[in-house]
Image (cartoon, rainbow, N blue to C red):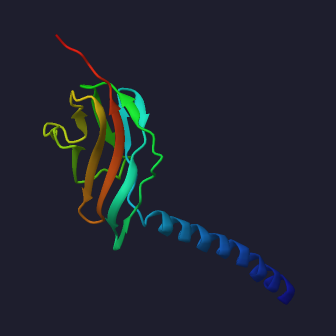
Amino acid sequence: MKKKIWMGGIGLIPIFSIMIFLDFQKVKKEEKPPLPTVKVGEEIIKADLKSYSWKGNTGTIKGSKDQLLTEVDPLAELTVTFNEGEKPDNMTIQTNPPEAYRNSVEPNRFTLPNYPGSHTLEINAEWERKGKAKYIVELMFKEKVSY
């Protein structure tokens, strides 16, 4: 009888170890804010987390010097979405250089300006109880000629 109890106790050790490991992974994942899905038309564009203050943790992430610019049409519509349950309470989108404008009608939609060249889009998102984050999207606006 004691041998069965002893073997059962030893069998529980790996189970508890796995549970602790998975819990640690979940906590580690929640140390940074969620990444948005950025689309221009149907094309998904990578958004890089630049800086954040999240659940007491702060950080700045250095950008890659080799980051590729995504070529997009000017005046196209850009949308920013988060997974269900991760939607920020407040979000703004603006360009750098700042000749463009913020879209105030729908905070997750932005009409790209008609200025050819490389532009950096800055997405600022804020969650009341969790923190805030700044994301960067690098774009190359095609030249559009209109008469």
Q: Which residue appears at 29% of the width and 22% of the height?
A: 143
The picture places residue 25, in percent across and down from the top left corner, at 55, 66
View extreme (bottom): residue: 2
The picture places residue 53, in percent across and down from the top left corner, at 31, 67
Dividing the picture into quarters, in which one does residue 104 lie? Answer: top left
Name the foreground residue: 95 vs 49: 95
Position of the C terminus, as image quadrant, is top left
Name the foreground residue: 87 vs 113: 113
**Relative to residue 50, is residue 27 depicted above or below?**
below
The picture places residue 9, in percent across and down from the top left corner, at 75, 82
Q: Which residue appears at 13% of the width and 36% of the height?
A: 105
Position of the N terminus, as image quadrant, is bottom right
Dividing the picture into quarters, in which one does residue 43 lie? Answer: top left
In the drawing, does residue 94 fall left or right of residue 66? left
In the drawing, does residue 54 fall left or right of residue 98? right
In the drawing, does residue 62 fall left or right of residue 26? left
Q: Which residue appears at 35% of the width and 33% of the height?
A: 140
Dividing the picture into quarters, in which one does residue 68 lie? Answer: top left
The picture places residue 66, in percent across and down from the top left corner, at 48, 46
